Image (cartoon, rainbow, N blue to C red):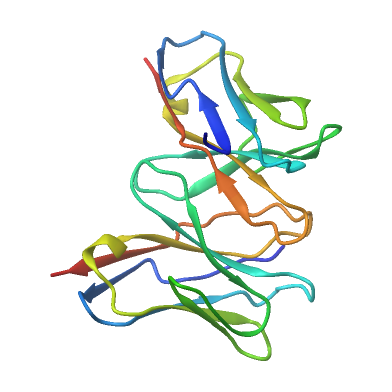
Amino acid sequence: DADVTQTPRNRITKTGKRIMLECSQTKGHDRMYWYRQDPGLGLRLIYYSFDVKDINKGEISDGYSVSRQAQAKFSLSLESAIPNQTALYFCATSDQVTDTQYFGPGTRLTVL
Amino acid sequence: LAKTTQPISMDSYEGQEVNITCSHNNIATNDYITWYQQFPSQGPRFIIQGYKTKVTNEVASLFIPADRKSSTLSLPRVSLSDTAVYYCLVPTRRRALTFGSGTRLQVQP
């Protein structure tokens, strides 16, 4: 089984809808991250969490919210989706010592 | 905040050695330097990590000079399957890694 899983893998939705992307990990890491990637560009950090009670905004948090339900689960929500949030979304985890990140397979989100 | 600078793109041919250099002038004393590889529509994958001097694994080597303000990822004898985007990362002050645009390596036959 994969160490970092994301659901759903693909999602098409309409403008104004609320969307939740879920991430689960079995690596036992305290740190979890959400990134988005637009075609041809690098990854941009949306939110990150260093433990269940520590959640921080990244570079592009506007329009997004997160919930760290447990050490192993970190969800990303789009309260009211808009077309420019169409992108590939990645969840990642890391250990505290080296910060080596392990990525999930990604969720391709399309907002019409 | 630590910031990295690396070339936008590089071209190479199969069998050649490729060196990608990254500058990180503001790296903190305790920070590691980490390199990732990303294929289209996949999440980045860890390649190698180092703190100083030289690190080698089955995939690559990482050279870090004494001042640690730069690092060089070396890929020996690249193949077509090494065509990817390569990211150099150091932690920010809060230790959240920020990916830049990376270096797009294109390997030709």
Q: Position of residue A50 (x, y in %)?
A: 79, 43
In the displayed structure, would residue A50 be above or below residue B87? above
Q: Is residue A41 left or right of residue B106?
A: right
Q: Nearer the viewer, residue A15 or B12?
A: B12
In the displayed structure, would residue B70 be above or below residue B98? below
Q: Position of residue A64 (x, y in %)?
A: 63, 25
Q: Quadrant of the N terminus of chain B?
A: bottom right
Location of residue B41 (image quadrant): top left
Residue pictured at 47% horizontal, 71% vertical: B6
**Number of numbered discs:** 0
Q: In which quarter of the image is the C terminus of chain B?
A: bottom left
Location of residue B99 (image quadrant): bottom right
Residue pictured at 77% horizontal, 42% vertical: A30
Q: Is residue B33 left or right of residue B72?
A: right
Q: Nearer the viewer, residue B16 or B5?
A: B16
Residue pictured at 43% horizontal, 24% vertical: A9
Residue pictured at 63% horizontal, 29% vertical: A24
In the displayed structure, would residue B44 be above or below residue B22? above
Q: Looking at this view, name the residue that lies furthest to the left.
A: B109
